[in-house]
Image: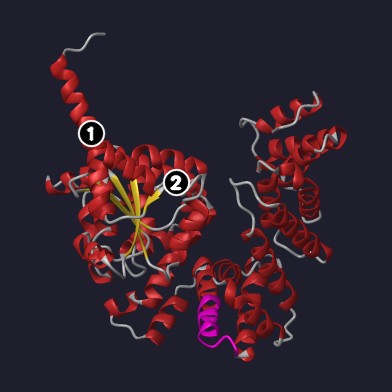
Amino acid sequence: MIMNSRIIKIVFILCVLCSPLITQAQNEVANDSVGIKFMHESLAKAFETASVLNKPVFIDCYTTWCGPCKYLSTTVFPDKRVGDFYNEHFICIKLDMEKGEGLDIAKKYDIKSYPTLLFLDSNGEIMHKEAGSRDVDNFIRLGQKALDPKLNSAAIERKIKNGEVTPETILYSLANSSIDNSKVEGVLNSYFKNIPEANWADSSSWSIMSIYSPLKSKYGQYILKNDAALAKKYGQSAIENSIARMISTFYYSGYRDYGYGRIGALHYIDSLKNPLVEKARMRLTASMGFSLVMQDPSDSELWTKWFDKTALYQMKYENNKVPGFPELVYLATNNKSDIKYICETIQSTKHNYVPSAIQAIQFAMVKSKFTKEKNMMQSTIDSINVGCEEILKNCNLDPLEANNFAWAMVEHQQRDKFLQVAKKLSAYTLTKGDSYFWLDTYATICAQLLQFDEAIKFQGRAVEARKKQSPGEDNHYQERYDQFVKHKTLF
């Protein structure tokens, strides 16, 4: 192709003008080799780069004290798939909403919860805005949604201005406005006014009711009266989560909108006589107990009371399973500097659950050293393996947690250095049950160790267990079995 001299001059001038910004953008993100490459500059600089590269801007609106913000930073942002997608499609920056220009940005874009994930075009107009943490796959879907002119926030805002009342406009209005509990029911009424109650169980209606129904509203009462049918349609965990949300919201704030005090709110909850309400109430009590402990973690009596409440909940609703102590796991993962002190205080309570609580903390600490995508130093690998070996000496972990970690080890690019301890973790899960998930994990590990006779035996059991639970469904466990018969590994 031959270009005339005028076109060559124009191209040359554009290259000269744009190259400093492009080079600057490359230099600003060059420090990160995996995951999202965040620019360490102002929003104004990000807009300049976005304009040159014809990309929108993604802002992680965080605070230093926000646990879900830390989860995104340590687990999601470093993921290679997340980095590949976001680095290709966005100019990315992180801003603390409580200092510097973050204060002005929080005010301008009405940032009230954290993390808020904000997508702006190069002119600073909102393309998409959502709050809350999410896992790797859903974080990638979030970016895809932000880029979709038919699905993103800007598209929904246009529908709202046009007076459209749809599930997406209602959900968006409830999630992104300052509507208090007393007005939520009115917003729901605007959507449900033309929908007969017989259709409230439809997926579009359920997507709204399950998240926003106030406990004392007719929508909340509908959920309580039809909990069995809804559980059959949407799954037991979905209905339990919905009821737990209603109970928690009512207990902490919603009761005021109906003229109750705190004690009256508890009496009303207890009067409902619904087994799932009772379960949610007991879980809430345990959670409140942990909040009290955190106000004075040196008080061993508070720890003892919390262990008793947790034990009562677990024995009644978790089939006497030893508690996994999710609150302590979260504490161990996000406040490592406090753990030694916490463990010392817990041990002073002499409660029967102390060994299990300490083990849950230790396992959380071991897992926190495990990096999914990056090559780990040998010292870190040794520390993880030794930690798992110590825990396995007197193991009483939640088998689901043990299985998930064993599988993470198998998927790791350095899996050969973890396979022996992964097999021991997986073998432990099989002492607690015959789940096809756990059988499949154990068989896969055996195959990776080239122990194909054992792999075939346990994968065969996984295939049969899967058939019993879900007959007629696609069974990829059979495909793995066929691979192992041919002496082929999964990875």
Residue type of the residue flagged with mark 2: Asn
How far across and how far down the image is residue 294, in percent? 53, 82
**In the rendered image, which residue does mark 2 sit on?**
138
Q: Could you tell whether 269 is left or right of 453 in the image?
A: left
Q: Is residue 99 magenta?
A: no
Q: Nearer the viewer, mark 1 or mark 2?
A: 1
Q: How was this image coloured? A: secondary structure
Q: How many numbered marks, from 0 up?
A: 2
Within-10-Å neighbours for mark 1: few <14, some 14–19, many 20+: few
Q: Which mark is residue 16?
A: 1
**Region of the chain picked out in magenta, as a range:** 286-298
Image quarter where the C terminus lies is top right
Of mark 1 and mark 2, the one earlier in the sequence is 1
Above or below: residue 137 compared with residue 296 = above
Magenta stretch, main secondary structure, is helix
Q: Return the residue nearer the eye: 294 or 104.
A: 104
Q: Return the residue nearer the eye: 35 or 117.
A: 35
Q: Return the residue nearer the eye: 395 or 249.
A: 395
How far across and how far down the image is residue 457, in percent? 84, 36
Q: Is residue 150 visible?
A: no
Q: Could you tell whether 283 is left or right of 149 in the image?
A: right
Residue lying at 27% horizontally and 77% vertically, measured from the top left: 257
Above or below: residue 333 compared with residue 343 = above
